Amino acid sequence: MKPGKIWANFGVQDVQRTKEFYQKLGFKLNGKPTEDLVSFFFGEENFIIHFFEEERLKSSLEGEMSDPNQGNEIIFSLSSKTKEEFDRWITEIKEAGGKIIFDSNKDRKKYYDENGYYVCVFSDPDGHKFNLLYSEKM
């Protein structure tokens, strides 16, 4: 197999709320949003994440969707280029309505390895989780 592109599809309760959250964080829209879909580009390679209204996405699945507030479906990692950018993003996530689950700035002993990573785990308003990472060695 040699797929041309790969992208992710998430279910959300409120497409407009999702649109506003990711736009506040500076992500670029992929196409024009509809009532049941908003899509964004992530990272330098323009990885695409579609956010479908839950019922629309559920209708195309063979089985139930997981509840990201009860566990983890997948976690994407987003790297920052500087420590200042990492810290600014944490503030922006909070201001946009995201939830900080873990911030290694607050407890460096809990998460620190020989690579000196700073880690922030956060979730969007629907509970979809992301790692925010920074290390001088990246």
Image (tube, rainbow, N blue to C red):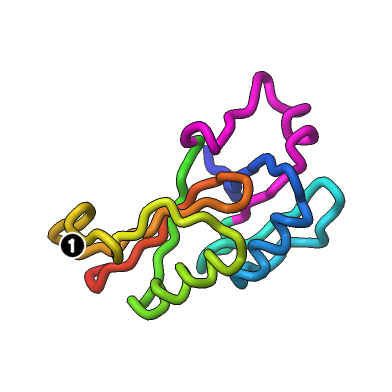
Left or right: residue 93 compared with residue 82: right
Magenta run includes residue 29: no
Q: Which residues are magenta?
A: 48-72
Does residue 99 sit above or below 126 in this rendering?
A: below
Residue at screen point 25% across, 59% down: 107
Q: Quadrant of residue 30?
A: bottom right
Q: Alpha-carbon neighbours of circle 1 within 10 Å: few (<14), some, or many (≥20)?
A: few
Q: Quadrant of the C terminus?
A: bottom left
Percent x, y for residue 7? 60, 48
Residue at screen point 78% across, 61% down: 31
Does residue 71 sit above or below 28 in this rendering?
A: above
Percent x, y for residue 44? 51, 68
Q: In the image as oriented, which residue stretches furthest toward the left?
A: 114
Residue under numbered circle 1: 115
**Which amino acid type is shown beneath numbered disc 1?**
Asn
Residue at screen point 76% across, 48% down: 14
Residue at screen point 66% across, 62% down: 21
Does residue 20 sit above or below 77 in this rendering?
A: below
Percent x, y for residue 43? 52, 65
Q: In the image as oriented, which residue stretches furthest toward the right?
A: 35
Identify the secondary structure beneath mark 1: loop
Question: 37 or 87: nearer the eye?
Answer: 87
Percent x, y for residue 118? 29, 64
Magenta run includes residue 69: yes
